[in-house]
Image (cartoon, grey):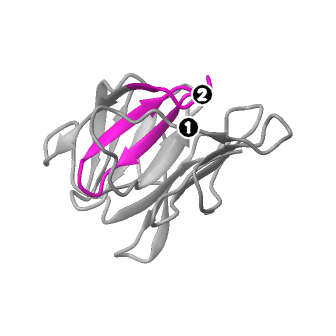
Amino acid sequence: LLCLASTFALGCAVLDETGTTSRDPLTSDVVDLASGSWRTLQVSDSPSTISHDGRLAFLPNGDFLLADGYWNGRVVKFNEAGEYLMEWGEVGSGPGEFDLMHGTAVDREGRVYIGDRTNNRIQVFTAEGEFIEEWPDVHDPVNVFVDERDAVWVVSASHNRILKYDRAGEFQY
């Protein structure tokens, strides 16, 4: 279990042996329970300050992504020890730009799904931040989850619904 929480306590995830994640809001710094004991990890801050984080997701290799989307409009990547690796994105509405990121998920192949809330879309990237595609007209996506069958579930706050998509971005129901 690794957790990263801020004022909003939005970034916690449980990583199992398949690389699937689930979230559980907690408070406090980054905590590693996988070792069987409580220990706090110090997350090396990226070159600029992290504002209010939107979500946290884990890659299959243990690296994790922080959607730093309230003011900075970027995804920050750390290794499993909490050391800064890289970042991508900025505030805007073009590919790779974000306006209030909410919801971050990773599938088994390492594709990263970002809920770009104010831009009403899901953006899909490689684990290295390369833009793959955009799913337009996904209204107010506040959370994204990829299940064990690779279905992509999106919580739409404005529609007050949970929406199901396939990995190609085709709406299922």
Residue to which mark 2 is pinned:
81
Residue 75 place in picture, x, y as percent:
35, 39
Residue to which mark 1 is pinned:
42
In the rendered image, the quadrant that contains the N terminus is: top right
Give the residue type that dot 2 points to: Ala
Q: Where does the magenta region start and end?
A: 61-85
Residue 32 quadrant: top right
Q: Is residue 137 magenta?
A: no
Q: Is 160 placed above or below 133 here?
A: below
Give the residue type that dot 1 points to: Gln
Q: Residue at x 77, y 42 (%)?
A: 33
Q: Nearer the viewer, residue 87 or 7?
A: 7
Residue 157 place in picture, x, y as percent:
39, 73
Is residue 103 visible in the rendered image? The answer is yes
Give the Cα distance between marks 2 and 1. 8 Å
Q: First in sequence: mark 2 or mark 1?
A: 1
Residue 2 placement, left or right of 120: right
Q: Nearer the viewer, residue 73 or 95?
A: 73
Residue 91 place in picture, x, y as percent:
17, 47
